[in-house]
Amino acid sequence: MSLRAEVYSFDSFETASIEELRELQLARLSSMLARTYERVAHYRRKFDAAGVQPNDLRSLADLSKFPLTTKEDLRQNYPFGMFAVPMDSIVRVHASSGTTGQPTVVGYTQGDIRTWAGLIARSIRAAGGKPGDKIHVAYGYGLFTGGLGLHYGAEQLGCTVIPVGGGFTERQVQLITDFKPDIIAVTPSYLLAIADEFDRRGIDARKTSLRIAICGAEPWTDGMRDEIERRMGLQAVNIYGLSEVIGPGVGQEYVADKDGLTIWEDHFLPEIIDPDTGKSLPDGEEGELVFTSLTKEAMPIIRYRTRDLTRLLPGTGRAMRRIERIKGRSDDMLIIRGVNVFPSQIEGVLANIPEFAPHYILEVTRPGQLDELDVLVETRTPAAPHTEAALARQAEHMIKALVGVTSTVRAMPPGGIERSQGKARRVIDKRPKG
Ligand code: DLL
């Protein structure tokens, strides 16, 4: 790393030029690979089997020679086998439960917690927050990285943190009304449930003190953003991250641009691969997002397959590249009678029918030989049965035309679909496995 790069304070990398950024990434990547090879038996075995050594890396492009890492690798090393430091240097663990099997466990040194808090502080600033703002954190606290991740970063920025956590929706409304926060950090689906609770109490949600919502942890659409902004009278921006990479704060959307998420590339090197072949794809092409950590101490991660589908785009406000809003996860993709369907595509269609609220569930069954897709969606206001039926037929027609799959849509009255208090569950797949 050049002296120039080294003397930068933590956050001046945010505004580094492309050349400075690439130089910094290569220097950080080389030392991270060497350290990880030396300290983590799993990576040593995988590199040896693939016939690559850390000093084979001469340019950033050489990274594609190194093996990919999957959630399965983390599971096989459960709980602490991927750590690169002795246990007495680990000051915190988090874990993500996933839908099946063992949780994946991640660890942090004191330095990692500082780095992470710095990146969240940067994310909150990009979202339009500033020191002195009050932030209501409604992401879950505990093993999930959302609550504590936002918490430490907000403190580092100099905000007043209100550590509410998820759930107890009536209390969320009460605290927003009484404590008058400027910012709320929450999953987009839960923010809509909070908006419903404001309505139920007859309080105008647009009149609260909230200016900004920092929403992430689950896929959402521009339609949902419009809905949130309209009902809550604030700016809703996207935050991205995953526990295996660090937690929230891997990427953040700038409120001034709202044009996708800037990846904090001074700490996480993004790549896009073809999810079927594992081959690297050029920037601009859609595929699976892969990350390599550049600075993590406790649990460095090399070419981690996120399963998230998106594209890498050039930077706008910054030299750092952006990703498009996540389209879905490769493991969320439903194959219904041979047609590939992402829940976000159905959500996009439903959002075009103004009578529908953005609360829906996809149920997939196979009563005989063929798959069936049922779409359950709420209307915004109670509707007569014949109106519900007419809206449902309209949606079925649009889903067939735009997504290419036959479905049965059932319109439900407001409140008919269970609300999440964290990540929404959109798909119930009842087909026999295997
Ligand atoms: O969800 C970390 C997080 C907390 C991010 C709070 C943002 C805010 P995990 O539980 O490990 O970590 O889940 C990570 O959630 O691979 C994506 O599939 C999804 N995800 C996270 N943020 C977004 C987003 C946290 N903004 C997984 N848009 C990721 C779409 C997202 N999907």
Image (cartoon, rainbow, N blue to C red):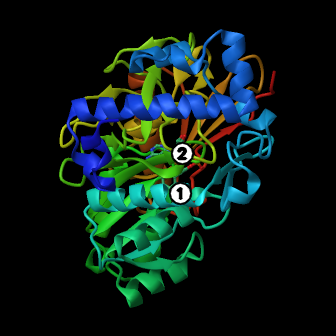
Q: Which residue is rendered at x = 30% and y = 66% of the image?
A: 212
Considering only vertical position in the picture, is 417 above or below 21? Answer: below
Task: State left or right for residue 130 relative to residue 69.
Answer: left
Instruction: Name the residue at 26% across, 79% down.
Output: 207
Residues packed near mark 1 inside 10 Å, few (<14), some (14 to 19) or many (20 plus): some
Q: Nearer the viewer, residue 387 or 263?
A: 263
Query: Residue 204: horizontal and vertical position, in percent?
Result: 31, 79
In the rendered image, is residue 241 in sight?
yes
Which residue does the numbered mark 1 point to in the structure image? Answer: 111
**Count of residue discs:** 2
Instruction: Report the disc number at residue 296.
Output: 2
Query: Where does residue 159 sit, x and y in percent of width and height?
Result: 36, 76
Q: Is residue 36 left or right of residue 77?
A: left
Crowding at dot 2, Cα within 10 Å, few <14 / some 14-19 / many 20+, comes out as many
Image quadrant where residue 368 sits: top right
Which is more toward the observer, 191 or 121?
A: 121
User: SS of the residue at dot 2?
Assistant: loop
